[in-house]
Amino acid sequence: MVRTKLLCTLSGGPYNRRVPDNAEPIDASTRYCAVYGHPISHSASPAMQNAALVHLGLNWRYLAFDVDPSHLREAIIGAARMKFIGLNLTVPHKLLAQEIVDVLDQSAKTWGAVNTIRFEGRTADGQWVSLGALENCDSQEIRSHGFNTDAEAITRSLVEDLSIRLPGARVLLLGAGGAGRVAALKLASEQISELYLINRTRSKAEALAAEISKRFPQVKTTVGYPTDKADLLLNATSLGLNANDDLPFDPNRYHLSSARAVYDMVYRPAETALLKTARQAGCRTANGAGMLLYQGARALEIWTGHAAPIEIMRRALLNHIYGD
Ligand code: ATR
């Protein structure tokens, strides 16, 4: 036990000094938000969110916790009890949280995943109000309200970073895991015309194709590569995170000259092998930093009720991930 404690201390957490320079000192009125994940040590969300909180003049802090999935329920209840303003959830918590939160927003119901929780207190007149908006949060009744801000962030980033026009687009999506599923459903809802799905485990691509065909029958969905030019190739697999990863598609069966634009949800490194190959093939390219930015900006708006300072958040995020 003592040994574990010593290792934790030496591993760097308590010595993290990247607090924004002009943050108000922590005192008894400081309020908290956090991201839970497993693992969590590479999360860029604290840097992005704390910069925004300072800019908004809020005496709040945004923390990051490694929470084992078997403890997710306790960790959410604990945050509510401590009157946290809200939480973000990342891998592997987004599906499980649907069963844990007290109320699901339509966004979480539609996309089948929760990445943002807002804690709400009940006022004297029976209204549920964000704890971030309550002057004194002595409400005994607090509920957790689950949202999904990932889906909107995907399309916002595609439109803003790649200038893609989604209605009528032909899309090749690589990956049918959690991120791939939300991307496929959101793209289908944006009235793309054709969706091609590739996944290492083919049965998952087939199950996703069946779900899309049922919910969005107007979208022509195929498991396999397109034969004609695609407007967008979107990588939603984790391939690219490591320098020696293979490309996320089979180069014997597909060539990037057949894609107009390529988006890689992986954002570290800034230019993955996929993006480099795509740039060399003449495609427009963007990485997933925009997605991370926009899901976080929307979460902040859900907690504060105010517009997020996008450029402040973007700068803090890029600075944290890539350095100056
Ligand atoms: P996330 O929530 O980030 O999407 P996930 O649900 O675990 O995480 O999905 C990871 C995706 O990357 C899946 O599409 C996975 O393919 P499988 O469904 O076959 O597991 C894909 N992936 C991970 N490692 C891979 C590898 N070495 N080769 C090909 N695809 C891989």
Image (spheres, helix red, strand yellow):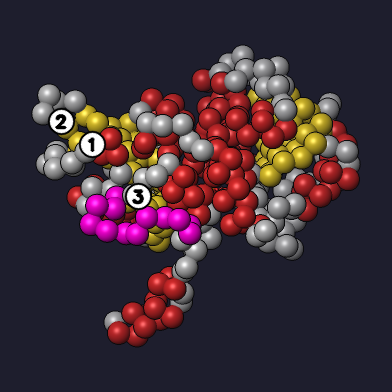
Q: Main secondary structure of the magenta part?
A: loop
**For the residues bearing labels 2 and 1, Cβ distance under 8 angstroms:** yes
| Bounds of the magenta segment | 20-31
Farthest residue, direction bottom: 3
Disc 3 to disc 1, C-alpha distance:
13 Å
Residue to which mark 3 is pinned: 60
**For the residues bearing labels 3 and 1, Cβ distance under 8 angstroms:** no
Q: Is residue 260 above or below residue 21?
A: above
Q: Quadrant of residue 197?
A: top right
Quadrant housing the C terminus: bottom right
Disc 2 to disc 1, C-alpha distance:
9 Å
In the image, which disc is placed on residue 134?
1
Q: Residues within 10 Å of mark 1 (few under 14, many from 20)?
A: some
As for residue 228 lying within the magenta part, the answer is no
As for residue 22 lying within the magenta part, the answer is yes
Q: Quadrant of residue 120?
A: top left
Res. 57 visible in picture: yes
- The percent position of residue 252, horizontal first and vertical second, equals 85, 46
- The percent position of residue 241, horizontal first and vertical second, equals 66, 57
- The percent position of residue 48, horizontal first and vertical second, equals 51, 49
Residue to which mark 2 is pinned: 123
Name the secondary structure under disc 3: strand
Q: Nearer the viewer, residue 26 or 172?
A: 26
Q: Is 116 displayed left or right of 247 in the figure? A: left
In the image, which disc is placed on residue 96?
none
Amino acid residing under circle 2:
Thr
Q: Residues within 10 Å of mark 2 (few under 14, many from 20)?
A: some
Res. 177 visible in picture: no
